[in-house]
Amino acid sequence: MIKKIIILLFVLSFIHISYGKLNYLSKGKWRINTDFNYNTSSSIFNLNSDEKIFGRDTFNIIIPDSIPYRYILKHSFELKEYIFSPKLEYAISNNFLVFLEIPLVWQSMSNVYENDTNKYSPTFGRQITRAEYSTFFPDYYGLGGSLEFSKGIVSSSLLFGMKVPETFKNGYEQDTTNNFYIYNAYKFYLGLISGMNFEKGFLELETSYLYRSGDFGDLFHIKFEGGFTSVPNTALKGIVIYNINLSGFDEAQPVNPRFTTLREDVLDVGAAFEANVSDNVNIEFSYLITLGLTNTLKYGNLILKTSIVL
């Protein structure tokens, strides 16, 4: 309850300086957006919000003269994700956009033991791969839109949408290669983009509530951007993203790089460079890193966005 009250106060404190930095189109225009994300992770924040890099396995063997011998090996992982997200937007009116998107995801993970220094071990002096996994799948089909209801120096936009799982049902779906376990659920969100424009800079706040069916916990999403420009048609931006789990962690499944994390608190920070190449082409390059917080993977996230108006 306290967390929800804090969120509400945070949102209300920004509503009166609302500015929508969404780039709307003229009625009847189409726009193609493509996002390419490269995400990497090699550690987790557990349910106690402690960062963990290594796991440990215990081995029991019998050495000469039938003497029991026990040793422990640490192991680490490296998870990689490549996400390609084509998105098609259409302007129903000058201040009303709708969109359709279908992200495609490639995941791979390498799980490796440390160099074995136990002289009685059968792998003494070597570094052994514990496991390797990979999978490819279409992610959620996205449908939604944005509606601008005030504009100018002070303006704002309403966000709405849904994400439909490619399986069209809730629950874990083991992929065909028996490697990753992806949890599917229907997701619906409603939010507000708000901020303020200056002569050579801007502030922008996005707040939205994300309902997730199945075993997922609902999320409150906060994204804050601030930027400035010193060269025409370009901008440097700072970004903070805070996703707050609203369902608690009493029954949460501990984070696992092979499983979809169902409940987590996540804080990401980063920077971006944006440029208008022409009147119809825009690009943005950004990098984000996860600073925590609870029951989540620590990601480094490299993003390239392009936007082309037809």
Image: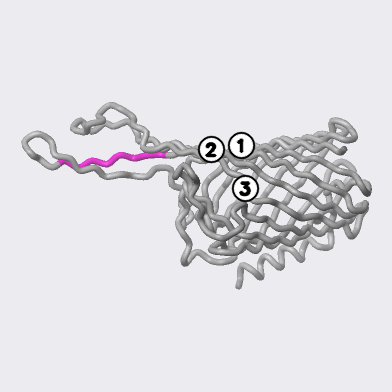
Q: Residues within 10 Å of mark 2 (few under 14, many from 20)?
A: some
Q: Amino acid at mark 3?
A: Asp
- Residue at numbered disc 3: 139
Q: Going by the picture, which residue comes out furthest to the top? A: 125
Alpha carbon distance from label 3 to label 1? 15 Å
- Residue at numbered disc 2: 80
Image x and y of residue 9, in percent: 71, 67
State yes or no: residue 239 in magenta.
no
> CB atoms at circles 2 and 1 under 8 Å apart?
yes
Q: Amino acid at mark 2?
A: Lys
Residue sitting at x 58%, y 43%: 137
Residue 31 visible to an observer of this rendering = yes
Residue sitting at x 55%, y 57%: 264
Q: Amino acid at mark 1?
A: Tyr
The dot on residue 38 is 1
Q: Nearer the viewer, residue 153 or 192?
A: 192
Closer to the eye: label 2 or 3: 3
